[in-house]
Amino acid sequence: MLCSSELRQPTRFGKPHTRLRKRGHAGFTLIEMLVVIAIIATLVAVVAPQVFRNVSDAKVNAARSQLEMFGLALESYRLDNDNYPSTEQGLAALRTLPSLGAAPRNWRGPYVRRVIPLDPWGREYVYLAPGRENRDGYDLYTLGRDGQVGGTGEDADITSWGGAVK
């Protein structure tokens, strides 16, 4: 039998050495690692399409919500000034007093609290006043993910009038 002083004798590196050490290997085998990787890959293949579909739906919904928010601000602007900002004044007229074009009669802005954001795909919203679709009002739209007229899904145009861009 070993006495307690023999069990905890310091080694030449200063750490105590225990002679009664279990003989086993710590870690995973290659097979175990491959099984774990295969399970993770299967989960990613099943879950990833659902996650990415939700991301694209969220971007489309965000664009629709922003168009509605701009629509309310544009209506407030029109009520104060009897018309919408011109195309050259753009949506910036909702945030700061326009310096381009005819000065508004009774600007009581800002009509939006924050800086006018880009669409969810990183491009500016298109604003036309008077509009091509709405001659007495404005057209406000984004061309979707692809930045091209037309498309389906996330590539579809999102407009203030609910129709397609022509």
Image (tube, rainbow, N blue to C red):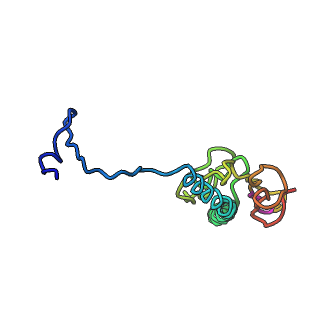
Residue at the spot x=62%, y=52% of the render?
93
Quick check: is 140 in the magenta stretch?
yes
Q: Quadrant of the C terminus?
A: bottom right
Percent coordinates x, y for residue 19 in the rendering: 24, 47
The answer to whether residue 136 of the structure is visible from this angle is yes
Residue at the spot x=21%, y=40% of the render?
15
Percent coordinates x, y for residue 57 in the rendering: 69, 64
Quarter of the figure with residue 108: bottom right
Percent coordinates x, y for residue 122 in the rendering: 66, 48
Part of the protein shown in magenta: 136-141
Quarter of the figure with residue 100: top right
Depth order, front residue of 82/18: 18
Depth order, front residue of 60/101: 60
- Above or below residue 166? Residue 101 is above
In the displayed structure image, the side of residue 136 where residue 118 appears, left or right: left
Question: As drawn, which residue projects farthest toward the top?
Answer: 12
Percent coordinates x, y for residue 114 in the rendering: 53, 55
In the displayed structure image, the side of residue 2 where residue 40 appears, left or right: right
- Above or below residue 162? Residue 29 is above
Depth order, front residue of 92/7: 7
Residue at the spot x=39%, y=52% of the render?
24
Question: As drawn, which residue projects farthest toward the right?
Answer: 166
> How many numbered discs?
0
